[in-house]
Image (spheres, rainbow, N blue to C red):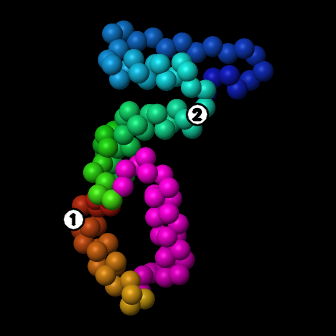
Amino acid sequence: RVGRGTEQSYCMFLAENPSEIGRERLDIIERVQDGFQLAEEDLRLRGPGEFFGTRQSGLPDLRMAKLSDVTLLELARAEAIRLFEEDPTLEMPEHNLLTRELARVWQEGGEWS
């Protein structure tokens, strides 16, 4: 974090022969002051990595949405929260299919998209 105190702060980035993406990152850092926007740009360039794996970058193969589909992902999150508030152990009969599918996906390696 730079510039959080009362004194003037400076930050220097040095890159010897940056790649095209590296140059784009430097341009973004130069023009963007908002940390959230920087994180979004980093996500766009680098990708989120694996949610349950060891890979730290690269876009996962989302089958129903892109990570940039924020509205859809927020709606899905809200629905998942509602579902688990209503039936935290997924024991209701109408959730049997979901329970089986979650178990299958987990056993096959945990690809949750």
Prevalent SS, magenta region = helix
Q: Which residue is disc 1 drawn over?
A: 108
Amino acid beneath label 1: Glu
Residues 22 and 5: in front is 22
Q: In the rendered image, which residue does mark 2 sit on?
A: 35
Asked whether 85 or 106 is in front, the reply is 85
> With 111 as the anchor, is 80 left or right in this view?
right
User: For the point 43% across and 46% down, which residue is it?
Assistant: 68
Q: Residues within 10 Å of mark 2 (few under 14, many from 20)?
A: few
Q: What percent of the width, then of the height, locates residue 14?
A: 45, 11
The answer to if 5 sits in the magenta stretch is no
- Amino acid type at circle 2 is Gly
Tell me the distance, in whole angstroms, between the alpha carbons under discs 1 and 2.
Answer: 37 Å
**Region rendered in magenta:** 65-91
Between disc 1 and disc 2, whose residue precedes? 2
Residue 76 inside the magenta-drawn segment = yes
Q: Residue 103: x, y in percent?
A: 29, 74
